[in-house]
Amino acid sequence: MAVEIVDPTIPVVKNLLLLDAEGKRIAVKYFTPDLNSVTAQANYEKSVFVKTSRTNARGEAEIIMFDDVVVVYKFLGDLMFYVTGDQDENEVVLFTVLQAFYESINLLLRNAVEKKTVLENLDLVLLAMDEIVDGGLILETDAGTVATRVTMRQDGDGSPLSMEAASAGVNNPGLVTLSQAFGSIKDQVARSLLK
């Protein structure tokens, strides 16, 4: 869903893309109306993949200008993370969003960032994308805060856990994902109806 931005100084993200090593869609979020059909999106994803697949963005993120769009991207394992913005968008801001994107996924998946794990935990990936950017507006760039919000974890005083605490306490038995919470609610409702 596109948001009409009144203030031109507010940084805006055009889309978040998570593609596999073959350029196929894993998870994407588009925030502009110019790519409103699935066919147009697939063609765009393919062209971005072809343009970036031969570069070495494994150690550091890369930035390119592609079809009047700034593309910031990084490869992690067998996945490719992309963040795009308008040609006049600040690359450092887009890089910060990209960093929050892949670091939060890395935290949520316990450093096992690969296609199979991402597909098994697609709900967490999509929630992380929603926590980082909504309607093109950047909401959060701290990976620890994103991971905490996605897993609905808080420390004793009700504040979100820091990135260090989130990464240190990943195996916390009190950790509840959204799907686990819904499953628990469903079980409780079923038990109360059977009484």
Image (tube, rainbow, N blue to C red):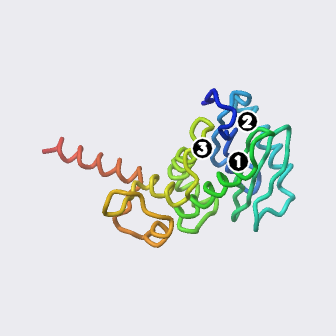
Residue occupying the point 47% across, 64% down: 162
Q: Is residue 2 left or right of residue 127?
A: right
Secondary structure beneath label 1: strand
Residue occupying the point 51% across, 52% down: 124
Label 1 to label 3: alpha-carbon separation: 11 Å
Label 2 to label 3: alpha-carbon separation: 21 Å
Q: Quadrant of the N terminus?
A: top right
Q: Nearer the viewer, residue 105 or 98?
A: 98
Query: Residue type at mark 1?
Result: Val
Q: Between label 2 and label 3, give the one nearer the viewer.
A: 3
Query: Residue type at mark 3?
Result: Ile
Q: Which mark is residue 138?
A: 3
Query: Residue type at mark 2?
Result: Gln
In the rendered image of this protein, does residue 44 appear above or below residue 19?
above
Mark closer to the chain start, 2 or 1: 2
Q: Nearer the viewer, residue 78 or 190?
A: 78
Give residue 104's quadrant in the image. bottom right
Kindly identify which residue carries mark 1: 83
* Residue 94 at x, y percent in the picture: 70, 49
Residue farthest along the left direction in this orientation: 195
* Residue 56 at x, y percent in the picture: 83, 63
Report the number of numbered marks: 3
Kindly identify which residue carries mark 2: 41
User: Tags 2 and 1 in contact by the CB under 8 Å rule?
Assistant: no
* Residue 160 at x, y percent in the picture: 41, 58
